[in-house]
Amino acid sequence: MYKLNSYVVYPMYGICKVTGISKNKVNSRLVECYVFECEGENITLKVPVSRVKEYRIRKIISIRLRKVLLSYF
């Protein structure tokens, strides 16, 4: 699970901030969703927790890991 106020990469929208977790009705069922505020698009999204992997949402890598990965090029 992502922590509140952390940042993630949402491939379709760019960098997003996790602003909350809410329960929403989807097909008459309550589903737990992350609430993302996407910086570049100025949009708020609610994504079911169970769909995060499918949408390829991921944490932003650390500066240290970035340096290691870029050293291979």
Image (cartoon, rainbow, N blue to C red):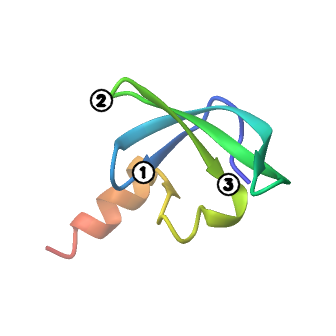
Amino acid type indicated by mark 2: Gly
CB contact under 8 Å: marks 2 and 3: no
Assign the N terminus to one quadrant of the image: bottom right
Distance from disc 1 to disc 3, alpha carbons, whole Å, reads 13 Å
Judging depth in this view, the residue of 25 and 55 nearest the camera is 25
**Residue 72 drawn at (x, y percent):** 21, 76
Left or right of 4 in this view: 61: left
Q: Position of residue 71 (x, y in %)?
A: 22, 68
* Left or right of 27 on screen, residue 67: left
Q: Amino acid at mark 3?
A: Pro
Q: CA distance from mark 1 to mark 2?
A: 11 Å
73 w.r.t. 40: above or below: below
Given this view, does label 1 or label 3 mark the residue nearer the observer? 3
Answer left or right for 22 relative to 18: right
> Relative to residue 40, is residue 48 depicted above or below?
below
Extreme residue in the top direction: 42
Q: Is 73 on the left or on the right of 26, as rendered?
A: left
- The part of the image, by quadrant, that contains residue 3 is top right
User: What is the total number of numbered labels drawn onto the structure image?
Assistant: 3
Which numbered circle lies on residue 48?
3
- Residue hosting label 2: 40
Q: Residue at left 41%, top 54%?
A: 64
Measuring from the top left, give residue 67's x and y in whole percent. 30, 58
Along the viewing direction, whichever of 51 and 19 lies nearer the viewer: 51
Q: Secondary structure at mark 1?
A: strand
Which numbered marker is on residue 10? 1
**Residue 15: image location, x then y, percent:** 39, 39
The residue drawn where x is 36% and y is 23% is 42
Whichever of labels 1 and 2 marks the residue nearer the N terminus, that label is 1
**Residue type at the position of mark 1:** Tyr
**Secondary element type, mark 2:** loop
